[in-house]
Image (cartoon, rainbow, N blue to C red):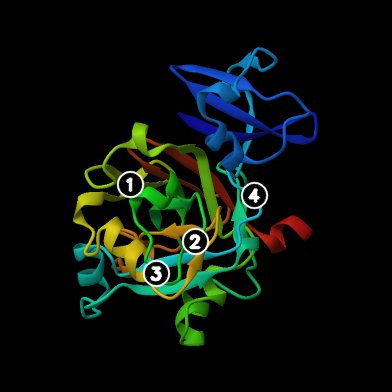
Amino acid sequence: MRIARALVDGSPRIVITDAGQSRLAPESHPDDALAALESGRSGASADWSVVDLGDLELLAPVAGTGKIIAVGLNYVDHTAETGFTQPERPLTFAKYATSITGPTADVVVPDHLTQGVDFESELALVIGRRCGGETPATLDDVAAYTVANDVSARDVQFGDVQWTRGKSFDTFTPLGPELVTPDEFGDPAGHRIYAEVDGELLQEDDTAEMIFDVPTILAFVSDGVTLEPGDLILTGTPAGAGAFRTPPRYLQHDEVVTAGVEGIGELRNRFVHRSRLTA
């Protein structure tokens, strides 16, 4: 089963796709993708209208996220291209929830602060229930999988000597296009992950090539930390990001990044400089 959020007549609405058919929730249905997942296939009852998902403006599939926990240097080839030593345990950092944007929304670059904006296609996990703290989380605590682009202002990221601000500007976490339930997505290892810039393939790998697999990441990030429904975990990016190319390939105004994971779908976001919008 898949869950999306769409903007319909100015309001967010839930869309459930099951067995190849998409149904739009009535206006009275709460804007809560996790609740729709919990209700399961029975949630799309007779008062849900059949729609073509391709005709809808999709929003980020989760709203009200509390925490975004991201993992760095988690693919062998990506770690090698950065010149960093392969970590002995997951390297984690946080992103602000206000950085989340939709799967086709513009990413607005604060170009008065950065000239080094980069892309990172990632598999993201959505936590479905309160877990962690005293007992580490497991795959059973994952409600769904989706795609994220961990947009990074590299000059800010490395200039600050910590990663949070340079990865957390508004719109710097495109997410979607849908939530895919674990029964449909299957084993989180073994899925093609990729990114293109204006149609040029720059990242391509397999999620099986993670240094730390999804169960290991879940156990690590939740040991002593309580995870709440809707929290996001980004699992790292493969080789090919722009900062580590020769010469570096930073994103320019009006370029489009397509980030995808096999079995989920694609994000397609145009990058625009803020100064161009206000000129």
What's the CA distance linking mark 4 and mark 1? 25 Å
Residue on which the image places disc 4: 63
Q: Going 80% across and 29% down the picture, which residue do you hit? A: 9
Distance between the Cα atoms at labels 4 and 3?
A: 21 Å
- Of marks 4 and 3, which one's residue comes earlier in the chain? 4
Dot 1 amino acid type: Tyr
Q: CA distance from mark 3 to mark 2?
A: 21 Å
Q: Say which residue label 2 marks.
A: 151
For the residue marked with disc 3, what is the amino acid?
A: Val
In the rendered structure, find residue 194 and report the number of the disc placed on it: 1
Labels 4 and 1 touching (C-beta < 8 A): no
Distance from Cα at disc 2 to Cα at disc 4: 19 Å
Please determine whether, in this image, residue 36 is positioned above or below residue 74.
above
Q: Residue 12, percent across and down?
A: 72, 37
Q: Where does residue 191 sit, x and y in percent of width and height?
A: 26, 42
Are dots 1 and 2 in contact, CB under 8 Å?
no
For mark 4, give the secondary structure.
Answer: loop
Circle 3 sits in a helix, a strand or a loop, which is it? helix
User: Label 2 amino acid?
Assistant: Val
Which residue has dot 3 on it? 221
